[in-house]
């Protein structure tokens, strides 16, 4: 499996301190350079800076705070379990003393602005503490120290050059507004990290990173009690594992005959059909057989509770609880709107790379679209990338797709994902003499041949039963079959 060999030499980088962000920026920040974090209020700019300061020895870090007072910054960091006590602070934040007798307000005391007191204090602090990492929050406050934009740019350029000469790696935030845009700061920085958020999700995007490759596009961000974490977009071409593309059988001879042996490793299969027809049960049957070989499976349940699934399987002789106890099966119930697509992909990667999952089932695709928030086209691209990754890693992937109509005109899937499938297995209800029966068939199989005929399908207390080929029926895909001779539908061996 390839990892990050082409993304820069990690040993020469300064860690960002934010889990997942190092991967996005090629291994970390380049030493001695300056990087800008921008975003609207509440995006997590200061939190990202705190992680950066704590990415190494706190004694080698300096926090130049021009916004919030030191005690507020430390208190907020403690809420995320981040201890800034060992970090040196240069607190240049406004205080109550900044009010004049006329109650007017200046960001900095006039004497400091006129005499260059702020600049002197920063220079003294850097030379006193000799930090390796400097965080300035926010850099845009320096605008209030300069009489015009030209002087501001000159001041910032000089400041950043001074820090570079002192061997400091610098991170600074920007408060971008319509009245005070930060375009000039973007040009002056060596790299730009954008943070964004709305009511449903948080994103991170890198648009500039001098001297290094970086991963473009939007990456998911989560802020929790442990701080900030980045979930990079899944890039399947970066992963490859050697595997034997042998068939994974279901253990039911008639079903395996339909599939000419089973589902091959490293393929994506869609099992489609209407509600209650047996899609999830069919997927679980392949996992039951795999468990007998000591292989491990994972089911991501988007549309059914774990308890209901356990009860159903127990009633039809699929020993799911025993499989869980032996470690050959993991059930993961996913709540609606719980995570983003990159977060979900990160979880799947962990199960495959760390826990050795051989079969992954997503039950079902529609639930995935609801629970993993994002735009329709974006989610289609994400599930396509996830499928490609699993194929490259030799994992047998099963996607469950529900069809709305119980009978009627045949439809392979409800969503536009059939193109990513190597195999499509479909289940149908058949209305015959006033009774609903079931049939199973194969619509597509890339790696081998398959039976073109359908077989009767039944779920019993002893498990799944697949019958002989239904060779004497026509109109099966319409849901209302008719006999072509005198054979009976219920004749069984």
Image (cartoon, rainbow, N blue to C red):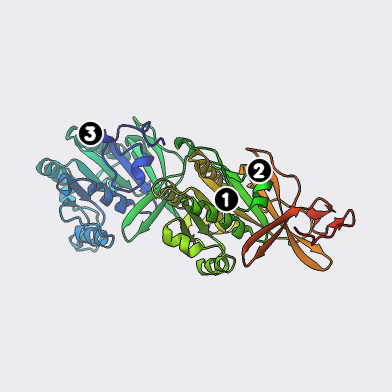
Mark 2, other Cα within 10 Å: few <14 / some 14–19 / many ≥20: some
Identity of the residue drawn at 31% across and 47% down: 173
Assign a secondary structure to mark 1.
strand
Q: Quadrant of the N terminus?
A: top left
338 or 153: which is nearer to us? 338
Q: Nearer the viewer, mark 1 or mark 2?
A: 2
Tell me which numbered mark, 2 or 3, is placed earlier along the sequence: 3
Rounded to the nearest angstrom, the CA distance separating label 2 from label 3 is 68 Å
Occupied quadrant, residue 264: top right
Name the residue tied to disc 1.
398
Assign a secondary structure to mark 2.
loop
Q: Nearer the viewer, mark 2 or mark 3?
A: 2
Quick one: which residue is furthest to the right in this view?
Answer: 485
8 or 186: which is nearer to us? 8
Measured as percent of width and height from the top left, residue 381 is found at 56, 44
Assign a secondary structure to mark 3.
helix
Name the residue tied to disc 3.
161
Rounded to the nearest angstrom, the CA distance separating label 1 from label 2 is 17 Å
Measured as percent of width and height from the top left, residue 462 is found at 62, 65
Q: Are marks 3 and 1 in contact (CB under 8 Å)?
A: no
Identity of the residue drawn at 89% across and 53% down: 484
Measured as percent of width and height from the top left, residue 139 is found at 28, 46
Name the residue tied to disc 2.
260
Tell me which numbered mark, 3 or 1, is placed earlier along the sequence: 3
């Amino acid at each position: 499996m390839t990892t990050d060999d082409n993304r820069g030499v990690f040993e020469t980088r300064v860690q960002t301190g934010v889990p997942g962000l190092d991967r996005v920026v090629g291994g970390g920040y380049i030493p001695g350079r300056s990087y800008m974090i921008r975003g609207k209020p509440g995006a997590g700019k200061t939190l990202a800076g705190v992680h950066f300061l704590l990415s190494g020895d706190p004694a080698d870090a300096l926090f130049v705070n021009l916004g919030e007072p030191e005690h507020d910054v430390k208190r907020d960091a403690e809420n995320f379990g981040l201890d800034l006590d060992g970090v040196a602070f240069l607190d240049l934040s406004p205080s109550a003393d900044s009010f004049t007798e006329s109650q007017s307000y200046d960001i900095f005391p006039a004497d400091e602005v006129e005499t260059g007191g702020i600049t002197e204090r920063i220079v003294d602090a850097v030379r006193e503490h000799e930090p390796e990492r400097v965080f300035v929050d926010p850099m845009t406050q320096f605008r209030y120290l300069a009489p015009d934009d030209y002087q501001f740019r000159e001041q910032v350029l000089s400041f950043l050059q001074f820090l570079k000469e002192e061997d400091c790696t610098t991170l600074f935030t920007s408060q971008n507004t319509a009245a005070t845009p930060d375009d000039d700061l973007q040009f002056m920085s060596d790299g730009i990290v954008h943070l964004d958020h709305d009511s449903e999700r948080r994103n991170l995007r890198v648009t500039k990173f001098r001297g290094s490759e970086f991963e473009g596009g939007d990456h998911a961000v989560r802020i929790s009690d442990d701080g900030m974490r980045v979930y990079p977009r899944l890039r399947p071409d970066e992963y490859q594992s050697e595997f034997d593309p042998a068939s994974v059988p279901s253990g039911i001879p008639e079903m395996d005959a339909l599939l000419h042996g089973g589902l091959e490793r490293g393929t994506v299969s869609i099992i489609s059909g209407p509600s209650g027809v047996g899609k999830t049960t069919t997927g679980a049957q392949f996992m039951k057989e795999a468990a007998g070989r000591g292989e491990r499976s994972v089911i991501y349940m988007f549309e059914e509770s774990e308890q209901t699934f356990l009860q159903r399987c127990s009633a039809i002789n699929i020993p799911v609880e025993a499989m869980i106890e032996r470690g050959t099966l993991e059930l993961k119930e996913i709540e609606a709107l719980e995570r983003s697509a990159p977060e979900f992909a990160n979880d799947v990667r962990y199960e495959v790379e760390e826990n050795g999952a051989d079969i992954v089932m997503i039950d079902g695709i529609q639930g995935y679209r609801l629970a993993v928030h994002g735009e329709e086209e974006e989610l289609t691209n994400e599930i396509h990338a996830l499928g490609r990754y699993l194929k490259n890693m030799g994992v047998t992937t099963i996607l469950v797709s529900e069809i709305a109509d119980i009978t009627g005109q045949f439809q392979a899937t409800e969503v536009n994902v059939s193109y990513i499938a190597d195999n499509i297995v479909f289940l149908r209800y058949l209305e015959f003499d006033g009774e609903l029966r079931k049939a199973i068939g194969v619509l597509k199989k890339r790696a081998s041949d398959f039976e073109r005929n359908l077989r009767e399908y039944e779920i019993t207390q002893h498990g799944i039963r697949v019958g002989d080929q239904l060779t004497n029926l026509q109109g099966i895909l319409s849901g209302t079959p008719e006999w072509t001779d005198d054979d009976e539908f219920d004749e069984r061996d």
